[in-house]
C-alpha cells in the first residue's frame, strides 16, 4: 500500500539475505522509530478505552470478532452491535456488490506524530453481502502502530502466534529492492490473515552476502492489517480499498524458501517478544526472485 512512501523515506537497495541466525533484539529498529511511541494525552480517551476492550475481549473468539459474528450477523444486527459498542452509528457506504461499515479510529492515534508521518491512521471496516444480508468479512488496519494509544501487542506477531499457534502458511513478499518486508501469517482453518510491513536497518550499499534481520517488536512494524472472513478468496474490491492478505501474489515466497526456518521454528521464536531472524543471503534471494 505504501511502498512508494518507504522509497521516499529511505533509499535502501534491498536485496535480501542471510544464513539463518536467531537474535533477541529489544533495541532493533528500522524505518519506524522508538521516538514515535505516544506520550501525550489522547484526543479521545473513551475511544482508546473501547478499542482496548474489544482487542482484549476473550469472550469473543473467532468467528466472533469485536462483538460481531462473521458469517452470521445481518446488516441490521451489525449496525446495532456497532452502535452498542462504539456509541454511535457506523459510517456506511455501498457499491453494487458490497455494503461496508466503517469504524473510524484515527483519534486513537497520536495526532502530533500522525501529522509528521507520510502515512498513518487506524480504522476497522466490515463487509456485508447485500444479496444474502450477511456480514462476511472484517478488517482492522493501523499504520505506525507504535503511534497508537491502544495496546496493540495482542495483534503483533508474538501475540498472534502465542494465541493461535503455527500458521498454515507464512510468506515473505519481496516486491521491490526498496520496499520494507511484508510478512503474512495465514490461518486458513480460522479464516484469519494478518499482514505486517516490517522495517529493518540496512546500509546504503548491500553486498551480495548481506543478510536482512527481521524483528517482531512493535517499533519495527510500520503497518499491519488483520482480516477475518468466511470467503477470503472472493473479496475483490478496487485496488487501494482493500489489500486482501488472504490471496497470494507472485511476489510472495514461503518462509521456508527464503530462510532456513520451518514454520514450527518460526512460531517458537516469534511467539516471544523482541526476537529476530535473518533470511538467506542477498545473492540467494535475488536468485529466488528471478533477478
Image (spheres, rainbow, N blue to C red):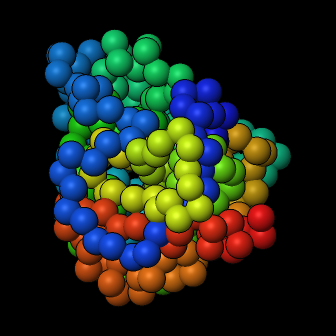
Q: Locate residue 47: give its quadrant.
A: top left
Q: Locate residue 46: give its quadrant.
A: top left
Q: Quadrant of the N terminus?
A: top right
Residue 7 horizontal/vertical position (percent): 62, 34
Q: Residue at 28% across / 71% down in the picture?
A: 22
Q: Which is more toward the observer, 125 or 74?
A: 125
Q: Is residue 233 visible?
A: no
Horizontally, is 187 left or right of 46 in the view? right
Q: Which is more toward the observer, 269 or 286?
A: 286
Residue 90 horizontal/vertical position (percent): 48, 33
Q: Residue at 20% across / 67% down in the picture?
A: 272
Residue 210 horizontal/vertical position (percent): 50, 60
Q: Which is more toward the observer, 272 or 16?
A: 16
Q: Residue at 55% across / 50% down in the picture?
A: 206
Q: Is residue 145 visible?
A: yes
Q: Quadrant of the C terminus?
A: bottom right
Q: Residue at 25% across / 26% down in the picture?
A: 35
Q: Locate residue 24: give its quadrant.
A: bottom left
The correct choice, above or below, for 115 with respect to 235 in the image is: above
The correct choice, above or below, for 277 with respect to 92 in the image is: below
The correct choice, above or below, for 224 with respect to 16 in the image is: above
Horizontally, is 165 left or right of 124 in the view? left
Query: Looking at the image, which residue sits at the far right?
Result: 96
Residue 143 horizontal/vertical position (percent): 45, 36
Q: How many marks?
A: 0
Amino acid at each position: 500500500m505504501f511502498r512508494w512512501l518507504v522509497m521516499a523515506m529511505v533509499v535502501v537497495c534491498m536485496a535480501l539475505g542471510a544464513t539463518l541466525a536467531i537474535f533477541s533484539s529489544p533495541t532493533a529498529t528500522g524505518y519506524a522509530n522508538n521516538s514515535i511511541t505516544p506520550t501525550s494525552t489522547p484526543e479521545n480517551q473513551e475511544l482508546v478505552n473501547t478499542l482496548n476492550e474489544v482487542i482484549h475481549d476473550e469472550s469473543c473468539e473467532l468467528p466472533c470478532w469485536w462483538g460481531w459474528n462473521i458469517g452470521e450477523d445481518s446488516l441490521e444486527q451489525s449496525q446495532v452491535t456497532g452502535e452498542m459498542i462504539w456509541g454511535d452509528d457506523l459510517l456506511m457506504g455501498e457499491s453494487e456488490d458490497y455494503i461496508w461499515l466503517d469504524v473510524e479510529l484515527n483519534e486513537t492515534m497520536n495526532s502530533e506524530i500522525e501529522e509528521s508521518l507520510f502515512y498513518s491512521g487506524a480504522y476497522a471496516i466490515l463487509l456485508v453481502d447485500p444479496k444474502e444480508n450477511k456480514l462476511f468479512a472484517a478488517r482492522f488496519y493501523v499504520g505506525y502502530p507504535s503511534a497508537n494509544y491502544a495496546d496493540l501487542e495482542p495483534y503483533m506477531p508474538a501475540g498472534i502466534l502465542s494465541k493461535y499457534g503455527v500458521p498454515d502458511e507464512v510468506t515473505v513478499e519481496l516486491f521491490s529492492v526498496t520496499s520494507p518486508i511484508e510478512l503474512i501469517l495465514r490461518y486458513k482453518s480460522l479464516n484469519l490473515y494478518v499482514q505486517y510491513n516490517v522495517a529493518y536497518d540496512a546500509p546504503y550499499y548491500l553486498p551480495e552476502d548481506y543478510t536482512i534481520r527481521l524483528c517482531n517488536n512493535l517499533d519495527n512494524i510500520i503497518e499491519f492489517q488483520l482480516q477475518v472472513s468466511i470467503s477470503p478468496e472472493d473479496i475483490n474490491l478496487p485496488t487501494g480499498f482493500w489489500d486482501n492478505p488472504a490471496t497470494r501474489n507472485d511476489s510472495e515466497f514461503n518462509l521456508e524458501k527464503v530462510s532456513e526456518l520451518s514454520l514450527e521454528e518460526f512460531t517458537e521464536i516469534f511467539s516471544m517478544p523482541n526476537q529476530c531472524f535473518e533470511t538467506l543471503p542477498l545473492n540467494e534471494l535475488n536468485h529466488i526472485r528471478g533477478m
